[in-house]
Image (cartoon, rainbow, N blue to C red):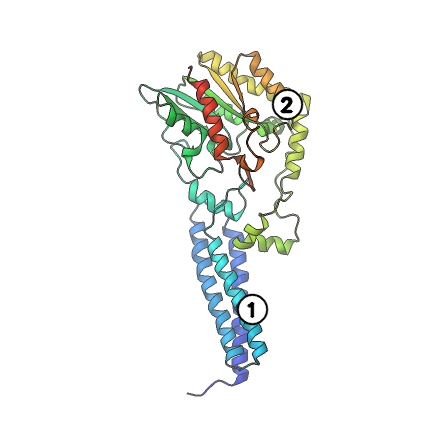
Amino acid sequence: MSRRSPTAANRLAIASLLAAIGLWAAIVWTTERLAWDYRGPSYALLYALRGSMMALATIAFVVAFALGVVRQRRSRRVQRTCMAALATVLTLTLCEGVFMFVPRSHNVGYTLGAQIWNRYYWRDKNELGYRDGPHVAVPGRKTVLVVGDSFTAGAGMARVEDRFTDRIAAERPQLHLVNLGRNGSDTIDEYRRLEAHPLAPDAVVLQYYLNDIEGAAQRAGWPWPAFAPYEDVPCPVQDLLRGSFLLNWLYWEFPHADGADYVAMLDKALNDDALLQRHLADLERFCRYAEARHVPLVVVLFPFLTDPEHCRPTLDRVEAMFAAHHVPLLDVGGLLRDVPVRERTANACDAHPSARVHELVATELGRLLATI
């Protein structure tokens, strides 16, 4: 068998190197197109394609090194440089593969780590689409409907047992707490879901957060802004950040202004008197719901966890409205005084309540519910 000429080996080395680079470009492109549908079969397809292409790219890099460096007997300096480059590529590839399986929740959920987190921990839903057990009455136990948004659903909580609803249920077996938490829900949507729920409650808990005014704002025609991830980097870098699990993780290790427009609009809405009046009217419907059915209503009011005094005038007006209807209210802000800011949220990228905050809420809310 004849040996290939140095020129032919060099050509094969260059072809292998270009193939490896092309495969990595395809990996980034594939991730960008498929990684966002984490609830469907495309995520399994993504992992199969990604794993195969990463293996092929690794082989191509090794072949390029063997043919272009080892076979050609390059100088020791060139060999060491190329060996260091190959080792770096292989290490980054290994890290990329590892971070394909590292979950981390996020405020909104568009990071790759959040996609993994959701696939690991947000898969079980009941017949009504809630992250909860079957919504059926339990003989001998009082039914408490707990309606809210992602705070109630347990965003950021890998174990549903850590949510305040589940903690209360475990400590007070006489109560059957039914979790009606749904991500992204606002006051209008929460009331609609409460009214449509098939169970007749013995008590209702409303979990409130300041962005629940969003529904009233949209109904009033406010142009509500979307979140804008990755806009602080050039477009080619955006594609790379969206397509690499490793780089995506590193990028979100630092704060970014992806929600700046959203927060600015929320502040504006909370300080608009006419809109706030609409919002209070929407909240008042929960009082009328409870009064018409002669069941107690309890409100759990969550402020901004990292700054409980932000928009305090708005919180005071919400509290005053419920107080006028003699509705007991748990102000979570008062529970946070002895909790360091970093321990109040799920993680640095996720401002949902931490397990510790859920525990504090469960203790105080459990005391309020013990009297029903």
Tell me the amino acid under the disc marked 2.
Thr
Name the outermost residue toward the bottom.
Answer: 2
Q: In which quarter of the image is the C terminus?
A: top left
Tell me the amino acid under the disc marked 1.
Ala
Q: Quadrant of the N terminus?
A: bottom left
Q: Which residue is drawn at 48% across and 12% down?
A: 291
Name the outermost residue toward the left.
Answer: 139
- The image quadrant that residue 158 belongs to is top left
- Residue 224 position, x and y percent, is 63, 34
248 on left or right of 2: right
Which numbered disc, 2 or 1, marks the residue that appears first in the sequence? Answer: 1
Q: Which residue is drawn at 52% across and 67% down?
A: 87
Question: Dot 2: what SS?
Answer: helix
- Residue 10 position, x and y percent, is 54, 79
124 on left or right of 11: left
| 207 vs 365, nearest the viewer | 365
Residue topped by disc 1 = 85
Q: In this view, does 72 lie above or below 314?
A: below
Q: Is residue 131 visible?
A: no
Q: Which dot marks residue 314?
A: 2
